């Protein structure tokens, strides 16, 4: 398969109990997904690990990176492929020391060029910008513009993730501006996950972008 201009980075809903493991399998089977972020709130680490383990196996079986949101300690406990850090969730150097050199470490950088450059200098594997559109998943406190993606792609080799209210119908400008990954949650889980993932791939394939190393 030809390399796509952007790849999907799925983020879990907050409720991953019940039949969610079946839904995850269907979503991942609908097309090549690069990563899945396990994002739960307000539960202890033991319960989070219990919920994560079957989802982690589903990802491993499909060679999809399993990324833990916020918690370096949970990522280490699970032997996860990586961790995604908000600005208040610890630093890249600590995560690298605890998770090892092969861990994928991402950092939320909102709409800040300075935060992104700092994350890159500290050794992050990717930076995440947003929100680009209003989101139903979390409160929108920072709004990022397409110029941020264009600027980043014009200067840096480090991959960037676009996040915030992204749907199959509005993702084209993000792809064309240079988003290496599209982080999506409610646009997949709020309906038929298989059909929604397929719709994203149709949108991505319809919007080719010249690779930055071309």
Image (cartoon, helix red, strand yellow):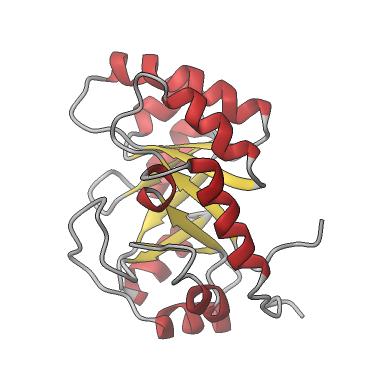
Quarter of the image holding residue 62? top right
Q: Residue furthest right?
A: 1
As displayed, is residue 3 above or below residue 114? Answer: above
Q: Percent x, y for residue 187?
A: 40, 53
Q: Percent x, y for residue 20?
A: 42, 26
Q: Is residue 108 left or right of residue 27?
A: left
Q: Percent x, y for residue 39?
A: 34, 37
Q: Nearer the viewer, residue 107 or 9?
A: 9
Q: Percent x, y for residue 205?
A: 68, 67
Report the number of numbered marks. Answer: 0
Quarter of the image with the N terminus is bottom right
Q: Is residue 98 left or right of residue 44?
A: right
Q: Is residue 173 left or right of residue 17?
A: right
Residue placed at 55% from the left, 73% from the top? 175
Residue placed at 34% from the left, 21% from the top? 17
Q: Nearer the viewer, residue 2 or 118?
A: 2
Quarter of the image holding residue 209? bottom right
Q: Is residue 130 left or right of residue 170?
A: left
Residue placed at 32% from the left, 21% from the top? 48
As displayed, is residue 93 above or below residue 2? Answer: above
Residue placed at 49% from the left, 33% from the top? 99
Quarter of the image holding residue 104? top right
As displayed, is residue 94 above or below residue 207? Answer: above
């Amino acid at each position: 398969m030809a390399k796509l201009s952007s790849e999907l980075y799925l983020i879990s809903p907050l409720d991953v109990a019940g039949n969610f493991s079946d839904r995850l399998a269907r979503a991942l089977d609908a097309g090549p997904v690069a990563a899945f972020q396990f994002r739960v709130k307000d539960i202890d680490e033991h319960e989070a690990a219990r919920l994560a383990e079957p989802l982690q196996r589903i990802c491993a079986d499909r060679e999809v990176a399993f990324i833990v949101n916020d918690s370096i300690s949970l990522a280490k406990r699970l032997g996860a492929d990586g961790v995604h850090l908000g600005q208040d969730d610890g630093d890249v150097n600590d995560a690298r020391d605890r998770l090892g050199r092969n861990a994928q470490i991402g950092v939320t950088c909102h709409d800040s060029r300075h935060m992104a450059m700092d994350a890159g200098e500290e050794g992050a594997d990717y930076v995440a910008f947003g929100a680009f559109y209003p989101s139903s998943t979390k409160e929108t406190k920072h709004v990022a513009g397409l110029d941020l993606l264009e600027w980043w792609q014009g200067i840096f080799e480090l991959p960037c993730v676009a996040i915030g209210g992204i749907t199959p119908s509005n993702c084209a400008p993000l792809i064309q501006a240079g988003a290496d990954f599209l982080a999506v949650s409610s646009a997949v889980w709020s309906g038929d996950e298989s059909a929604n993932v397929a719709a994203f791939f149709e949108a991505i394939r319809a919007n080719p972008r010249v690779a930055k190393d071309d």
